[in-house]
Image (cartoon, rainbow, N blue to C red):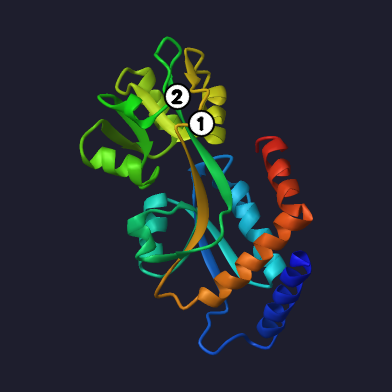
Amino acid sequence: MRQTFFRIALALWLALAGSGGQAGEPPGLIVDFDASNPPMMYAGKQGASGLYPALVAKICERAGIAVTLRAGSWRMALQELREGRAAAGGIIKTASREKLFDFSHPLYYERVVVAAPTHAPPFRKLEDLYGKRVGVMAGWSYGDAFDLARKDGKFAAFDGDSDEQNLRQMKLGRLDVVLGIREPLLLALRNGGYSGFALSKEALVTNPSFLAISKTSQQQALLTRFNLALEEMRRDGSYDKLVRGVFNARDE
């Protein structure tokens, strides 16, 4: 019954879209992604690539939403999101961001892990980072608790532009650990040949990621259609199929 409800609701939205949508509603979405976070999102040969661009493209296709996908600096993506000039894909929700942006239903659940020398003690909780030099991605949030601990100086956080850059800094002895999402951090470790380093077995934290739009963008109706299509994909199995396909595909 619930699946039928979602299909009917989505069909109504598509009918509305076909007749021009609501008055004043922008015709489509421009979505920015991080260009240096494979396999989640990156600049591929054909433009924005990875899990989040693939998900957003397929969801928008099902919802009848015209979409433009762009890969670039995450700092620039956040700036354009704040200014209402583009949406952002693969973003984490925080208390401060909720004041400025509206969020979709979760796109994916990111497991944040720690890369450290193999001889280092295990990292199982946020407090294990205290007193350490921690490599993070510039412009990223790893959740409210992490952001507060960073602000309070519990550890020294250093912003890098990619996992590879942070891992190089750790190899040079300038960082004690590197924080990142499990899939891209594991990929960077393997491709870079960092044999003396390993990922924590347990996730430090698990954060849902979202599509976000500015509250001033007047695109809330599009976000509703996006959510309906996303939930339909989860129910019919096409969401899981897409995720498996992205992670099982060979690297470009």
Above/below status of 82 relative to 241: below
Residue drawn at (53%, 83%) of the image: 25
Residue drawn at (34%, 18%) of the image: 172
Residue type at mark 2 is: Ala
The residue most toward the top is 119
The answer to which quarter of the image holds residue 176 is top left
State the image coordinates of residue 241 (x, y, percent, origin top left).
75, 47
Q: Which residue is mark 1?
A: 185
Residue drawn at (34%, 24%) of the image: 128
Residue type at mark 1 is: Leu
Asked if the residues shown at circle 2 and circle 1 are in contact, with their CB atoms under 8 angstroms apart, the answer is yes
**In the image, 2: left or right of 160?**
right
* Closer to the camera in the image, 156 or 208: 208
The kind of secondary structure element at disc 1 is helix
Residue 49 visible within the image? no
**In the image, 83: left or right of 31?**
left
State the image coordinates of residue 9 (x, y, percent, origin top left).
70, 75
Q: Which mark is residue 230?
A: none
Residue drawn at (21%, 35%) of the image: 153
Above/below status of 116 relative to 159: above
Above/below status of 16 relative to 197: below
Sequence order check, earlier mark of 2 and 1:
2
* Closer to the camera in the image, 201 or 85: 201
Other residues around mark 1 within 10 Å, as few (<14) / some (14–19) / many (≥20)? many
State the image coordinates of residue 179 (x, y, percent, origin top left).
41, 32
Above/below status of 33 relative to 163: below
Q: Which mark is residue 115?
A: 2
| Total labels drawn | 2
The kind of secondary structure element at disc 2 is strand
State the image coordinates of residue 220 (x, y, percent, origin top left).
51, 74
